[in-house]
Image (cartoon, rainbow, N blue to C red):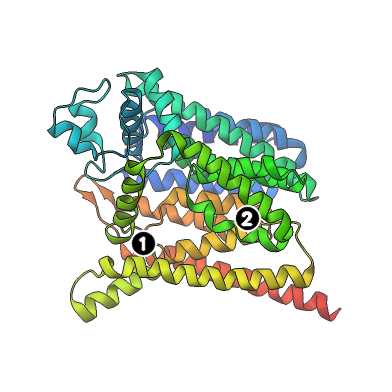
Amino acid sequence: MVPKKTGSLLLATLCVLLYGYLAFFLERTNAVQLLTSFVVLFGVYLWLAKKSPESELTFWIIAAFVFRASFLFSIPHLSDDFYRFLWDGHLLNAGYHPFAHVPRYYIEQSIAIPGISTELFNQLNSPDYFTIYPPVNQFVFWVSAKLGGDTIWIGVVVMRLFILLAEVGSSWFIYKILKRHQLPPSRVLLYALNPLIIVEFTGNLHFEAFMIFFLLASYWFFLRNQLIPSALFFSLAICTKLLPVVFLPLFIVRLGWKRVSVFYVFVFFFTLLFFMPLLNWEIINGFRESLGYYFKKFEFNASIYYVVREWGFWKYGYNIIQTVGWKLAVYASAAIVLFYTWDAWTVWKKKDSNTLWLGYLALLTIYFLFSTVVHPWYVGSLVAFSLFTTSRFAIVWSAVIVLTYAGYSHAGYHESLLLVAAEYAIVVIFAFVEWRAHFKFSQAQILS
């Protein structure tokens, strides 16, 4: 029998090798190798989440960042978004507003900008769309492009160091919040060791890592009744991804009108302050155009929308995203309003204002179910939020959403609706069983 410490070292070594393979050698068109790697990594992850003793917590937290460090000097193979990040950074360095024009404009007008080249342009996945990235992202892009210059590899390393710092901060806040709520500190491993989070955040350079870090920091200061620092970090989350705006009404019942007004004023003030360097008509027009594209052109790994789209093909004979995409956003808003009503009643009835995470989890899930686009890295936020609740469907989702990578080939991307249906069926069934078990447990507590 292998000693426990030796077994842990062997498992950690296996993971380092697999993450190194994903970082430097695997192409996303190699679906079999990619999915096999994820299956092994998730198998180790789930085993550790269930079996790893508290005495090895420090070892596995350190191992989690060694896994992330495996990607440090690699160029992402599974995502090409980072090319646009560097493009925006070079524009800022040259004094151009990143929201002023689409990338093709600079090429067609032959505008000479250091770091901007035809080679970089040809790598962009959205050369005819306005940028969608708020101020925090743009700051990181600017620093990365400035330090990297014409060398893409250096710019990538700089961005990855920023994300690694955010991930260290997130793990630290998760650990502190778990202890504050008298929850098992080992739950931090559910975030720190999650293969999807490691690959999509540190590996593929997606900035949900910053949004999660800022929301965790905001909540930590919220727990300590320090509203101004809490508002500061919440505004930073908004300035990374606009999505946290939908969470703001959750604070009303928990803080009361007087204190929540102070909180909202400072969130608005800090958000305006961070947007100020970019705030002009160009950013307003750019965001308007970007949102229009998002709801009227983009579709990927959706659930409710795909059902509606198939109905549209049957009834009208064409893709009705132009009219349905924004309507689903309205329906999602209505569902969110209903949730707020239920949430306010529940909090008032139970007098429980200890945590916002169940609200975060439910609202974001509603949003994703109505969305026309659900990329794999989106689910990382749900994993982080679920750690402070009894819900684990987000962890299941983080495993099965990897199936979306099976659609890549040398001919381009072809989405399998069968795999999408399987993904959502597994998640919905697990969530339903989980909810039923929780409901029965709550009823038993009431009867006892």
**Looking at the picture, how far across and down is residue 425, in whole percent?**
46, 69
Of labels 1 and 2, the one closer to you: 1
Amino acid type at mark 2:
Ser
Disc 2 is placed on an element classified as helix
- Crowding around mark 2 (Cα neighbors within 10 Å: few <14, some 14 to 19, many 20+) is many
Q: CA distance from mark 1 to mark 2?
A: 23 Å
Residue beneath the point at 67% across and 61% down? 252
**Looking at the picture, how far across and down is residue 428, in whole percent?**
51, 69
**Looking at the picture, how far across and down is residue 221, in whole percent?**
72, 43
Drawn side of residue 249 relative to residue 277, left or right: right
**Looking at the picture, how far across and down is residue 411, in whole percent?**
19, 48
- Crowding around mark 1 (Cα neighbors within 10 Å: few <14, some 14 to 19, many 20+) is many
Disc 1 is placed on an element classified as loop
Q: Which residue is mark 2?
A: 386
Q: Which residue is mark 1?
A: 372
Write down the quadrant of residue 188 in the picture.
Answer: top right
Q: 144 or 397, which lies in front?
A: 144
Q: Which mark sits nearer the N-terminus, 1 or 2? A: 1
Q: 264 or 305, which lies in front?
A: 264
Q: Is residue 32 above or below residue 311?
A: above
Residue beneath the point at 43% across and 41% down? 134
